[in-house]
Image (cartoon, grey):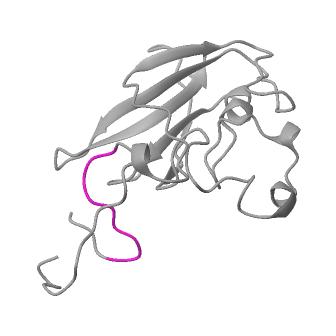
Amino acid sequence: MARFPDLTYKPLTHPSSHPVFKYNGFHPNKTYLLPKGHVRESGYQASPIDVIWQRDTAIEMRDGIKLYADVFRPATTNEDNKVPAIIPWSPYGKVGTGSQTYDNMGPWRMGIPFQALSGYETFEGPNPLEWCGRGYAVVDVDARGAGNSEGDVAFWGEQAR
């Protein structure tokens, strides 16, 4: 901001007061077991395996700012049995909470049928239940300044290091 002193900065509207954000609260480290066959809503894809979902897990950045992520991983994972992670990072909200969803971004759900998704994916992000079934974890991170992540959001420009 020092390079652009005449630039007016306005933070994003918090999810709890945003008109179209489907805010479902802040739940740090709340953990769920999504059993094999679990379906979030009728018509969506069923989970192919048991999956652990850890909500709003803090990830501390080197400058002390905390970003929050939802972590989906096969229930068989532990300290001795780790899996590779896919890391979607966006300002779109986690687990279908954001204003950008396949239901409102284009006609006919952008051509994606309900049964092809689990309802746990972020807009433009991977389907965590499908990828957990393939042996991966999905660490879905709210970008700096988005959702409940701390800091200032920076789009298409400079960001503090």
Quadrant in the rendering for residue 25:
top left
Image location (x, y in percent) of residue 21 = 52, 49
Q: Which residues are magenta?
A: 149-157
Between 99 and 83, the residue placed more toward the observer is: 99
Using the image, determine if residue 105 lies above or below residue 77: below
Image location (x, y in percent) of residue 161 = 21, 63
Q: Dividing the image into 4 quarters, which one contains the N terminus?
A: bottom left
Using the image, determine if residue 94 lies above or below residue 137: below
Q: Relative to 152, is 54 on the left or the right?
A: right
Q: Relative to 45, is 66 on the left or the right?
A: left
Residue shown at the point (17%, 44%) measured from the top left = 64
Between 104 and 48, the residue placed more toward the observer is: 104
Instruction: Say if the magenta span includes residue 42.
Output: no
Residue shown at the point (82%, 31%) measured from the top left = 45
Using the image, determine if residue 143 lies above or below residue 24: below
Residue shown at the point (35%, 60%) measured from the top left = 12
Residue shown at the point (63%, 50%) measured from the top left = 125
Image location (x, y in percent) of residue 153 = 33, 62
Q: How many marks?
A: 0
Image location (x, y in percent) of residue 144 = 33, 54
Quadrant in the rendering for residue 30:
top left
What kind of secondary structure does the magenta stretch mostly adopt? loop
Q: Relative to 21, is 160 on the left or the right?
A: left
Between 66 and 82, the residue placed more toward the observer is: 66
